[in-house]
Image (spheres, rainbow, N blue to C red):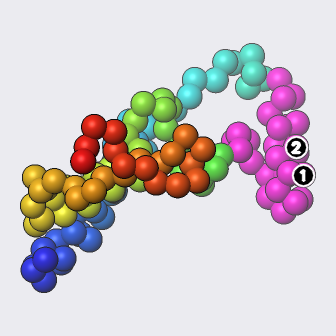
């Protein structure tokens, strides 16, 4: 592959990742409605103290636990970063390699997964 092709793959993948994160966390972000009865109850202070204990007594928060500090998107159907990133990289690779060449001697795993077997119907 030409050097210029290699130089294009990384930035393309990075741009794809930045765009999908923008769509998930910046463009579609919205506040979650909280019922007034909840705001006037002692549950928020109890939640704060409980989260403080779960965090080792150093910090408290009113937020629910999240895997990432920036939170999670409101719906799981948003694009995933890893698939968008890999899709962009593969698209760039396909631009520089012949993708219509047949695979020589293709194989599939055996039923028990311990060995490779010739692909059925191919010789």
Residue 55 spot, x, y in % from top left: 82, 56
Mark 1 in CB contact with mark 2 (< 8 angstroms)? yes
Instruction: Estimate how packed mark 1 is, as few (under 14), some (14 to 19) or many (20 or more) residues with alpha carbons within 10 Å.
Output: few
Residue 82 spot, x, y in % from top left: 41, 53
Q: Is residue 17 at least partly visible in the picture?
A: yes
**Residue at position x 18%, y 78% from top?**
7
**In the visual, does 106 lie left or right of 31?**
left
Q: Is residue 26 at least partly visible in the picture?
A: no
Circle 2 residue: 50
The answer to if 12 sits in the magenta stretch is no
Residue 99 spot, x, y in % from top left: 13, 56
Identify which residue, 40 or 68, lies in the foreground: 68
The answer to if 50 sits in the magenta stretch is yes
Q: Which mark is residue 53?
A: 1
**In the visual, does 90 lie left or right of 46?**
left
Q: In this rendering, is residue 19 above or below 31?
A: below
Quadrant of the image for the N terminus?
A: bottom left
Residue 107 spot, x, y in % from top left: 37, 51
Q: In this rendering, is residue 92 above or below 65?
A: below
**Residue at position x 23%, y 59% from top?**
104
**Residue at position x 80%, y 33% from top?**
44
- Spot the residue most to the bottom: 3
- Spot the residue most to the front: 123
Q: Which mark is residue 72?
A: none
Identify which residue, 30 or 100, lies in the foreground: 100
Tally of numbered discs: 2
The local secondary structure at tag 2 comes to helix
**Residue at position x 34%, y 44% from top?**
119
Q: Which residues are magenta?
A: 41-65
The local secondary structure at tag 1 comes to helix
**In the visual, does 93 lie left or right of 31?**
left
Identify which residue, 64 or 101, lies in the foreground: 101
């Amino acid at each position: 592959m030409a050097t210029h092709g290699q130089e294009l793959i990384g930035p393309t993948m990075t741009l794809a990742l930045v765009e999908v994160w923008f769509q998930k966390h910046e463009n579609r972000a919205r506040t979650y409605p909280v019922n007034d009865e909840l705001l006037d109850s002692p549950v928020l202070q109890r939640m704060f103290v409980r989260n403080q204990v779960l965090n080792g007594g150093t910090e408290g928060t009113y937020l629910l636990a999240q895997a990432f500090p920036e939170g999670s998107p409101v719906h799981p159907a948003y694009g995933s970063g890893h698939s968008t990133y890999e899709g962009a990289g593969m698209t760039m690779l396909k631009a520089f390699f012949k993708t219509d060449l047949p695979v020589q001697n293709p194989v599939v795993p055996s039923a028990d997964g311990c060995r490779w077997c010739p692909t059925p119907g191919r010789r």
